[in-house]
Image (cartoon, rainbow, N blue to C red):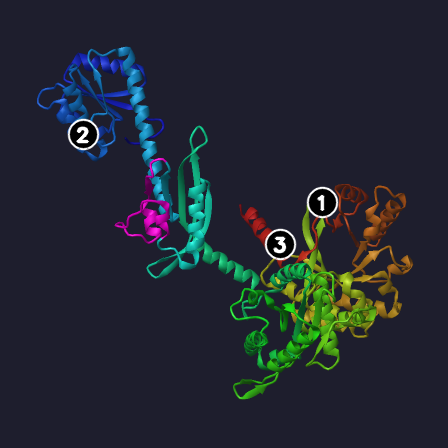
Amino acid sequence: MTHHAPNRLTTIQIVDDDSAMRLLTRATLEQAGFAVIEATDGSEGLAQFRKMRPDLVLLDVLMPQMDGFTTCRRLRALPQGRETPIVMLTGLDDVESVKKAFETGATDFISKPINWLLLRYRVMHILRSARLYEDLKVSQSRLSLAQRIARLGHWHFDFETDRFECSDTLRNLLGMAEKTSIDSPVDLLHNIHPEDRHRVQKTLEDALCNRHPYQATFRVAVQGKIRHINSQAEIQKTENGAPKTITGIIQDVSEIHQAEQKIFRLAHFDALTGLAKRSFFMKKLSTAMRLTEQSRNQLAVLLLDLDRFKRINDTLGHVLGDHILLNIAKRIRKSLQGCSILYPGSASEDYCIARFGGNEFAILLPEVESKEQVRGIANQLIRDISHPFFLDTCEVLITTSIGICLFPNGSGDHKDLIRNADTALRQAKTQGRDTYRLYHPSMTGPSQDSLVLESDLRRALKNDEFVLYVQPQVDMRNGRVFGAEVLIRWQHPRQGIKLPGEFLPLALESGLIVDIDQWVLRQACRRLADWQAYKVNDLRLSVNVSGKLFARTNVAELIGDIVEQSGIHPAKLQIELTESTIMQNNAKTISHLKHLKKLGINIAIDDFGTGYSSLSYLKNFPIDTIKIDRSFIRDLSNSPSDMAITRAIIALGESLELSTICEGIETLQQKEMLMDLGCYQAQGYLFGKPESMDKFSQTEAKGEQEEKKQAFC
């Protein structure tokens, strides 16, 4: 039976030599909403069938030249006639005639004289049954195709009759030839990998014996290749709840298994060395610490840092540097195996050695007997790593410093353990390198923490560990982003992202803030140059400059050189200074500001209203923008004094023809109140939280493309 367009009437073909019979049949069926076509004999009916493809045929048995039996047989021989319902109209009520009708392929028969009132319902019932049959065939065909695509086989076992059936796909997946006799589910275990067979056989036999569902995964060997198979089955019960049959499926999940393994390796293991990544190591370390507490044993963590490795990359290049790192990883593995701590191929080896990033490694010793044993291992590692590398025509010597922390004596949790081992590592670094130190609580203190942080900060500058974030600045009238404030974050190799408050105070105290400021300026100008080159939205970046940098006599020339080297339009850069910075050395500050203004760079006063500037001097400073501090915005709706100060600052900015930006806007109420006061430029969580520079750039580039499309349309 064929599918037709939804609006097409169901077509019934009448093949009968009796014109009166055709007339009455036609009238009855058309009244029921069917389309009817007529043929006067078998030959005409066959020709008409080929052309019109009716949905059902009413075929008279007794006709001249070609009777109904012959016509039915020939209809069934046609490709399009194999599934079409054929109903024989016969006045012959003997059993032999009915039997012959079905033998020639008839779907049903209707005896004459015909009950015209019931004819329509009989035809509708036969059509409905034919459609259900066709839908079932289509469904079975699709299911079979889906199973082949999904590499899915099935089997069925009857507990009462011991009858077993399985699909051809199942045989193929398990590598079982068609000749192989399969009489029960247990016969499916023939090609299972020897290491998996006992487990799967026990699972299956237990399910069959106890009449309960099961699920198992195993490997099979098919034509010399290993396939990973997932198998599961469920029990079907009688009305009384007794087990009746069990139906199971198997699926080839080899590709899924391989993909999962690949994803797992990519997620948890370093691509260069094959060692565990930090996150995976930390997870396993936490588990090992819980087991250690239960067993009342002790474990140790060793952090290794290759001494002065940066000079290797700077001198020999990163390719040879990576080559050395790969071989260092191999030496660590070999050294630990030689100490009989980690054994080749053991499950623990996959996570007990990790690369934390750059030239830092971590080792977990899950079971140690004493401090002396750990010291011996550390000494062995130092010796094994220090063997020279021969690269082309040169010999390279590498040394390492090691920090050690024991558990449970040395820390409370896995983060403390790593932090304390890192403290011990810094001690080893400061005391000559090429040595190890075992953590002791006396190592941890305010001064020690400060020294470690300052050391880390210096390393961060050398290793380019800082990243730029930005917070968008918007025009509240239309929501358009016109610029962004640059914010700095520290991607610490062991402690993750650090916010400015965690390191800038020390950077200011140590003087490192000057180098950090210059790094930020260069990176911001480099990104502006990228936007300018790729014609991204016309945005301005605001960069905070510390009083330390601004106190330098050549600060204006320094900033000018950075802008010139980047090739950006100076107006795209805005320098933000605090009130206190501006008020220091008034005459010198004015000179710097005028120089920057002459270059075309914008100047903004950050956190305006919180300092001690004299408003009478403000008109003397070549300022473009004042930024109202978030402290005034926070309680704007509840504090009359904050409202008055904010209104006054906005009025001051307007009178001096300065742009005014409000910081820290978090609610719609704050936005509406500020717009009522006449301030239209703002930044804050309401419009966007700080995000990475890359993400911000992608968002703005995409937004510009959408604007261009709309403008074009």
Q: Earlier in the sequence, mark 2 or mark 1?
A: 2
Q: Is residue 239 above or below residue 489?
A: above
**Vertical placement of residue 451 versus 69, above or below:** below
Is disc 2 placed on a helix, strand or loop? helix
In front of the other: 193 or 80? 193
- Tell me the tag on residue 187: none
Is residue 553 visible from the viewing direction of this image? yes
Work out whether mark 3 precedes mark 2 in sequence or the reverse, and give the earlier one.
2
- Taking depth in this image into account, of 99 and 69 the one nearest to the observer is 99
How many numbered markers are drawn?
3
In space, the residues marked 3 and 2 are separated at their CA atoms by 68 Å
| N-term-proximal mark, 1 vs 3 | 1
**Is the residue marked by circle 3 packed among few (<14), some (14-19), or many (20+) residues within 10 Å?**
some
Q: Which residue is mark 2?
A: 75
Identify whether 465 is placed above or below 62: below
* Residue bearing mark 3: 700
- In front here: 381 or 520? 381
Q: Regarding mark 3 in the picture, which secondary structure is present there?
A: helix
The percent coordinates of residue 375 (x first, y second) are 68, 77
Mark 1, residue position: 477
Q: CA distance from mark 2 to mark 1?
A: 77 Å
Farthest left residue in view: 65
**Residue name at image x 55 percent, y 79 percent:** 320
What crowding class fits label 1: few (fewer than 14 Cα within 10 Å), some (14-19), or many (20 or more)?
Answer: few
User: Three-letter amino acid code at disc 3?
Assistant: Glu
Q: Is residue 112 left or right of residue 184?
A: left
User: For residue 43, what is the image quadrant?
Assistant: top left
Between residue 577 and residue 457, name the one nearer to us.
457
Residue numbers of the magenta segment? 160-189
Disc 1 to disc 3, C-alpha distance:
19 Å
